[in-house]
């Protein structure tokens, strides 16, 4: 193997991100857009609310008619009509009259305010209750009170959501209210996952001497699913060129947008991935100044970006978090590529070798602060230390010792992207 290139994390990340592009858009049924990025501006075809309507069950009236009304000296109004939500008013309001109105019903002509039923002597909401002939109102209202005017929320012709915006449940409601049942969003990335190594068994195989099960294939499929992308599982390739080539071909046929493999990138590994990529694409082998996860390969296979992660399960997961996740989010059209980040106070003294280190930790809120405790053995084969962790603490490049009580940046695993 030729000399690997030494890169900082930021250099490696920049190179990976430069090698992937935002995917094209597709039109999908509205709900399929959840978590995805809008590929077009959304312009309101209608104003919302579309018509002036009541925000309360009550009586539509003329505010000036209630001048001076109190509990002791209520104003008396004649009830001339009734309007339910979904119906149109059957009467006009003139001075001295009122129309019973339900929440969401159109305000009748002539009325300029609504008074809630609670502030009348007819404090009933039941539509079946006969319409009273008159009501007594025990308060005043201002013109416009309890009326929701057209366009207060959205105005026809206005850009309501911009291209690049991520769709959450509230965006679904806005789009539905505008009558949009299909939406143009960035396609979900299809990501191939390949495990390499003669020692690997499928999950349902019994252990045999010298063998371990392919755990990376599952961690990575889950990481891809959690990103809203589509994992294409290529399974395990033994350490032969033929095996690797055959699996990668299956990925080509599945029309993937990115290949991710684990193992076979460390210096001294029996490196078949490298020779396959050199024949059918191109690849750079890097030593990233990062811990865990030093070895990394990046290139293309038949023109499709290829990211080779280290094999050790913790290194594989952390390098995925650092490089693959950012690449997949970029492809999916997101602009915020990193995990939500907070500043925490570390409870342990941390030692590093000067590489940028990603330390497994449990972060808990305490008073106005977040405290971080390491999850124990930081070996790159200790998967259970990832299970205990809800964060990765980042010890910057060049720092060899972090005293207890110091502040560090933490990447929060389980927080949604919209937190920060
Ligand atoms: P390598 O990069 O091939 O030297 O692999 C580094 C370490 O990761 C070795 O201990 C491998 O057995 C382990 N490893 C490689 N691939 C996987 C995998 N898919 N699942 C679990 N462990 C793996
Ligand atoms: Mg190997």
Image (spheres, grey):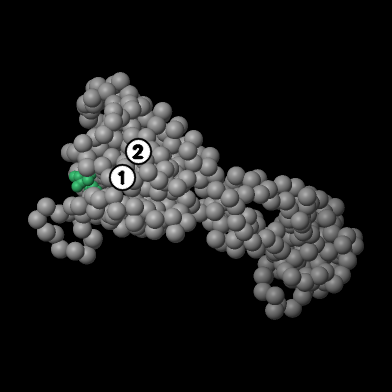
Q: Residue at x 59, y 46 (%)?
A: 165
Q: Residue at x 70, y 58 (%)?
A: 178
Quarter assignment of residue 69: bottom right
Q: Which of 293 and 155 is in front in this view?
A: 293
Horizontal side of 128 relative to 248 (left or right) equals right
Give the image quadrant in which the ligand numbered 2 is located: top left
Quarter assignment of residue 355: top left
Q: Residue at x 53, y 39 (%)?
A: 335
How far apart are the two marked residues, 1 and 2, measured between alpha carbons? 9 Å
Q: Residue at x 87, y 70 (%)?
A: 91
Horizontal side of 262 relative to 283 (left or right) equals left
Residue reaching furthest to the right: 94
Closer to the eye: label 1 or 2: 1
Q: Which quadrant: the N terminus?
A: top left
Residue reaching furthest to the left: 209
Q: Can residue 395 be seen in this view?
A: no
Q: Where is residue 262 in the image (x, y as percent from the top left)?
A: 30, 46
Q: Position of residue 80 (x, y in %)?
A: 85, 71
In the structure shown, which secondary structural element does the residue marked by tag 1 occupy? helix
Nearer-N-terminus badge (1/2): 1
* Residue indicated by mark 1: 273
Q: Which of 294 and 163 is in front in this view?
A: 294
In the structure shown, which secondary structural element does the residue marked by tag 2 occupy? strand
Q: Is residue 199 above or below residue 108?
A: above
Q: Are marks 1 and 2 in contact (CB under 8 Å)?
A: yes
* Residue indicated by mark 2: 297
Q: Where is residue 197 in the image (x, y as percent from the top left)?
A: 23, 50
Q: Is residue 330 above or below residue 174?
A: above
């Amino acid at each position: 193997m030729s000399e690997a290139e030494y890169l900082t994390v930021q250099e490696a990340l920049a190179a990976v991100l430069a090698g992937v592009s935002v995917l094209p858009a597709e039109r999908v049924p509205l709900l399929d857009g959840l978590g995805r990025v809008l590929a077009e501006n959304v312009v309101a075809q209608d104003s919302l609310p579309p018509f002036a309507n009541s925000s309360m069950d009550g009586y539509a009236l003329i505010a000036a008619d209630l001048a001076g009304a109190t509990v002791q000296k209520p104003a008396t109004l004649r009830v001339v009509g009734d309007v339910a939500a979904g119906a149109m008013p059957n009467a006009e309001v003139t001075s001295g009259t009122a129309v019973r109105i339900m929440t969401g019903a159109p305000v009748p002509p002539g009325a300029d305010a609504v008074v809630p039923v609670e502030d009348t002597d007819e404090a009933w909401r039941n539509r079946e209750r006969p319409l009273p002939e008159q009501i007594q109102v025990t308060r005043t209202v201002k013109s416009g009170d309890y009326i929701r005017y057209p366009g207060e929320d959205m105005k026809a012709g206005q850009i309501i959501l911009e291209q690049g915006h991520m769709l959450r449940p509230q965006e679904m409601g806005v789009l539905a209210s505008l009558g949009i049942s299909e939406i143009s969003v960035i396609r979900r990335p299809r990501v191939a996952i390949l495990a390499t190594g003669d020692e690997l068994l499928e999950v349902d195989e019994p252990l045999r001497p010298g063998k371990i099960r392919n755990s990376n294939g599952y961690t990575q499929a889950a990481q891809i699913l959690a990103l809203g992308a589509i994992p294409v599982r290529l399974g395990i390739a033994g350490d032969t060129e033929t095996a690797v080539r055959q699996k990668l071909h299956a990925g080509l046929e599945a029309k993937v947008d990115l290949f991710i493999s684990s193992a076979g990138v460390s210096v001294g590994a029996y490196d078949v991935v490298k020779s396959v990529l050199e024949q059918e694409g191109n690849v750079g082998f890097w030593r990233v100044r990062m811990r865990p996860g030093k070895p990394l390969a990046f290139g293309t296979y038949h023109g499709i970006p290829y990211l080779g992660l280290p094999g050790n399960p913790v290194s594989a997961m952390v390098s995925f978090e650092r490089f693959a996740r950012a690449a997949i989010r970029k492809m999916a059209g997101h602009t915020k590529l990193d995990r939500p980040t907070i500043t925490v106070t570390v409870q342990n003294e941390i030692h590093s070798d000067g590489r940028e280190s990603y330390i497994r930790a449990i972060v808990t809120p305490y008073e106005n602060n977040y405290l971080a405790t390491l999850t124990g053995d930081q070996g790159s084969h200790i998967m259970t230390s990832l299970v205990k962790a809800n964060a990765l603490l980042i010890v910057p490049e060049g720092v060899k010792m972090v005293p207890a009580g110091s502040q560090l940046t933490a990447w929060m695993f389980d927080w949604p992207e919209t937190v920060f």
